[in-house]
Image (cartoon, grey):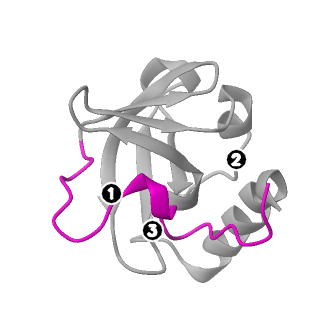
Amino acid sequence: MSSNWDAWDYRQDVNRGVGARSLVGYHVHATDGDIGKIDEASDDAGSSRLVVDTGPWIFGRKVVLPAGTVQRVDDEDEKVYVDLTKDQIKNSPEWDQTTTGIDDDYRGRLDTYYGGFYR
């Protein structure tokens, strides 16, 4: 893809600026099918991300998707499309949900993992 890819900010053409609807509750669609529903969303500049509850798909595991993985958002149908496969998402670094927030170490692992698909 592009060397300008930023994991932690939405792409410019995704249009998630100030005043955009919350993505909590939206369904997330990978390139090869649905992966779950957004449980949490952060729109903080430089650290935007989605926490997706995968339900039974990968045994109830929640995954963190940096905002840069979002290809487009359909507010009318409440769907978020990411340009990753289900396996790429399933194999993402495990998140310790007992911690509060996303620490620097985990953020770095996510950046390295997902960055490998975009840089």
**Mark 2 Cα within 10 Å, few/some/many (few <14, many 20+)?**
some
Instruction: Tell me which segment is drawn in magenta.
Output: 1-24
Residue lying at 43% horizontally and 28% vertically, measured from the top left: 36
Q: Which mark is residue 41?
A: 1
Badge number at residue 92: 2
State which quarter of the image contains the C terminus: bottom right
The x, y position of residue 116, in whole percent, is: 84, 57
* SS label for mark 2: loop
> Against 56, is 63 above or below?
below
Q: Residues within 10 Å of mark 3 (few under 14, many from 20)?
A: few
Q: How many marks?
A: 3
Q: Mark 1 touching mark 2, by CB under 8 A? A: no
Residue type at the position of mark 2: Ser
| Left or right: residue 18 compared with residue 37 | left
Left or right of residue 98: residue 74? left
Label 3 element class? loop
Where does label 3 land, which residue? Answer: 99
| Amino acid type for the residue under numbered disc 1 | Ala
Prevailing SS of the magenta stretch? loop
| Residue 16 in the figure: left or right of residue 91 | left
Residue 39 picture location, percent across and down: 31, 44
Which residue is at a point 29% across and 68% down the rendered structure image? 17
